[in-house]
Amino acid sequence: MSYAEVPPRVEYELTPRARTLTPLLNELVEWAASNLAGIVNDREEFYKKGLSCSHGGE
């Protein structure tokens, strides 16, 4: 499909296989929404303790 627009328009579409992920992604979004308060609280507690993420066994 071609559009005479500036800037040019690009349309994207998921493949049938990618669309099979939709229910899983919806569940992930629901989980995140229902656990948001706890996640925020845990993060605040983590930073209050002065902990940080370290990589490489430091």
Image (tube, rainbow, N blue to C red):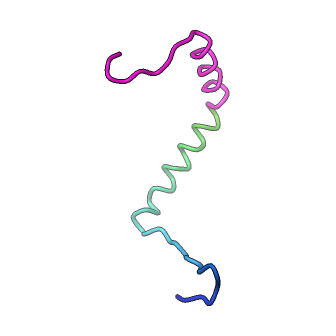
Question: In the picture, residue 10 is in which quadrant?
Answer: bottom right
Residue 27: quarter of image:
top right
Looking at the image, residue 24 sits to the left or right of residue 31; the answer is left
43 falls in the magenta region? yes
Which contiguous range is marked in magenta?
35-58
Expressed as whole percent of the image width and height from the top left, the position of residue 21 reads 45, 56
x and y, in percent, of residue 34 in the image? 64, 34
**Residue under the point 50% across and 18% down:** 52
Q: Count numbered badges in the picture.
A: 0
- Please check the rendered image and state whether residue 2 is part of the magenta-colored stretch, yes or no: no
Which residue is drawn at the image coordinates 64% and 31% (left, top)? 36
Q: Residue furthest right?
A: 37
Task: Out of 22 and 49, give the one closest to the viewer.
Answer: 49
- Relative height, residue 50 to residue 5 (above, below): above
Does residue 39 lie above or below 27 as drawn?
above
In the figure, residue 3 lies in which quadrant? Answer: bottom right
